Image (tube, rainbow, N blue to C red):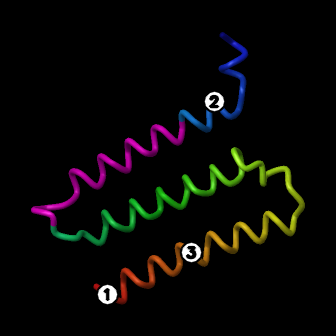
Amino acid sequence: MTAYRRNQLIFVWALLTAVTIASWLTARDGGEAHRLSVTVTVVVLLIAAIKTQLVIWHFMEVGQAPRWLKLTTNGWLLALFGLLFGFYFAAA
């Protein structure tokens, strides 16, 4: 049993689960009569970016990859969420 607790992937998985629940609670309680809330949207998108980074680095093992791959995935993540935020704020 202690071997499972020491495994880093178990901790990351537990963190991803907790963050998913926090994101759901934020989105569920933050909106008033299904109206868009800028704060809720920003928080949920930031949580999604953190979750994406954790999955890429730990489960896809980019954390042990060459530097160019780390930079490429980080750049892709920044571009993706930058576009999402840009589209959201342009439409609002």
Q: Do the residues labelled 3 and 1 touch (CB within 8 Å)?
A: no
Would residue 69 appear left or right of 37 to someone viewing this image? right
Of the 4 image quadrants, the one containing the N terminus is top right
Q: Do the residues labelled 3 and 2 touch (CB within 8 Å)?
A: no
Residue 17, position in %: x, y? 48, 38
Magenta segment: does it hold 52? no
Q: How crowded is mark 2: few (under 14 residues within 10 Å), some or many (20 or more)?
A: few
**Amino acid found under the numbered disc labelled 1:** Ala
The tag on residue 80 is 3
Q: What stretch is highlighted in magenta?
A: 15-34
Q: Check the image and name the residue furthest to the right.
A: 66
- Find numbered disc 2 in the image and state the secondary structure of the residue it sits on: helix
For residue 24, side relative to residue 11 (left or right) = left
Where residue 86 sits: x, y (%)?
45, 84
Name, please, the residue furthest toward the top. 1
Q: Name the residue under label 2.
A: 10
